[in-house]
Image (cartoon, rainbow, N blue to C red):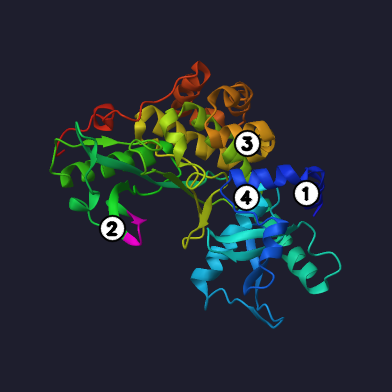
Amino acid sequence: MEEAEEAVRRYERMLPRERTNRLKRSGIEVLASQGRRDRELGVRVRYDVEICCLQAIRIKRRDTSGMGGAQESVLDREAASTLFKRIERLATKTLYTVGLDHGAVRLEASGKSGCAVISIDPRPWKGMTNLSAMYRAGWKQLQSELDEERHHNAAPILGMDPEFLLVQMPESKIVPASRFLERTGVAGCDSVTIGGRRIYPVAELRPAPSSEPRELLAHLMRAFAAASRSISDHSLIWQAGGMPQRGLPLGGHVHFSGVTLNGDLLRALDNYLALPLAVLQDPRGSGRRPRYGALGDFRLKSYGGFEYRTLPSFLVSPLVAKGVVALAGLIARDYQQLSQRPLAKADIHTAFYEGNREVMQAYIPALLDDLTNMDGFERYEQYAAPLISQLRQGRTWDESRDIRKLWNIRAGS
């Protein structure tokens, strides 16, 4: 567990104020000491969450009344699935944000955002025999999976579900995708909840996965064609990016299988893919963060892989989509070769969440040099090189454009 110990030492060198600021920039509520004292006389619900390898190994709930009474229970992953996943997700995000993949987080129920962070323990296994054994078992399993991957060195299988909007011009009125598309299928619609009501305004493409960028992009074109056949109002324009219309953020989620989820891979994706795209992105799209598009945002999937959720919708152009697919495959396959972590610095972390392109841009050339010097770059160069060229030129995309023209999608095709 030498890597875990080094991460703990980096965490301990971080000033408390910077820990708090990193959490707040990432959209995580932190309960100050005064706030804790103010709640002492009321009823509190707290969760002690123990995380190993980005997953919860135990969640303890404690309900405390102002009269001193308390009830404790251990949440069951299956029986309390929704609550368990919500608490696990927040605790994992908390640790990841301060540079840890293992540790314990104490949360308290909060009316503002669900739960607030009270404390972080980077060394919960010290002096705790049972918990220490669980950490060692989890770490051993992770290392076994990573060793197996390095032995086979196979290309990961990638999938995606990028989103776009249907917009009526010139009034910029969003037309719900559910008017034309079903909830399932390679071209479907996705939901958002507004005022407690679930609606389906967003169109989503779900092409079949592949380990080959060329094949995955061919599947994407078939999904585009299916969407075009179903969307009968040809006067609507299709928009993609981070937030082409105010108040409705879009995502470009990339799915991975055949590769083990771990903190090093997530940080490589954040620094070598999400950070460059944040520089390329239309400035109006930065408003989706931190509620959406937070660093290291992932979901484990039933097929055994995971979904990386940080990116905006990369359907803004074929050049961007091809580059994202290629770089995602390259990074996932050989991320051990990528060692730079500019997002660990306070100024670049702040710049990412504020959309400050000038600060972020200074770090991009060195990251691109690392990518082009990777052993496996040649396999992905055809699709990655044009995107890398645009990044070197410091260009941005335009989220107001109709993406059908760029993708050469004809009405009803």
Q: Earlier in the sequence, mark 3 or mark 4?
A: 4
Q: Which residue is mark 1?
A: 3
The x and y percentages for residue 395 are 45, 20
* Closer to us: 390 or 235: 235
Label 2 or label 4, whichever lies nearer to me, is: 2
Calculate the distance from the C-alpha at mark 1 to the C-alpha at mark 3: 22 Å
Q: Report the span colored magenta.
A: 191-197
* Structural distance between the alpha carbons of marks 4 and 1: 18 Å
Query: Which amino acid, by three-letter code, is at mark 2?
Result: Thr
Rendered image: mark on residue 380: none
- Residue at the spot of label 2: 184
Q: CA distance from mark 2 to mark 1?
A: 42 Å
Residue 149's disc number: 4
Q: Amino acid at mark 4?
A: Glu
Dividing the picture into quadrants, the one containing residue 221 is top left
Residue at 54% across, 34% down: 354
Q: Nearer the viewer, residue 49 or 248?
A: 248
Dividing the image into 4 quarters, which one contains the N terminus? bottom right
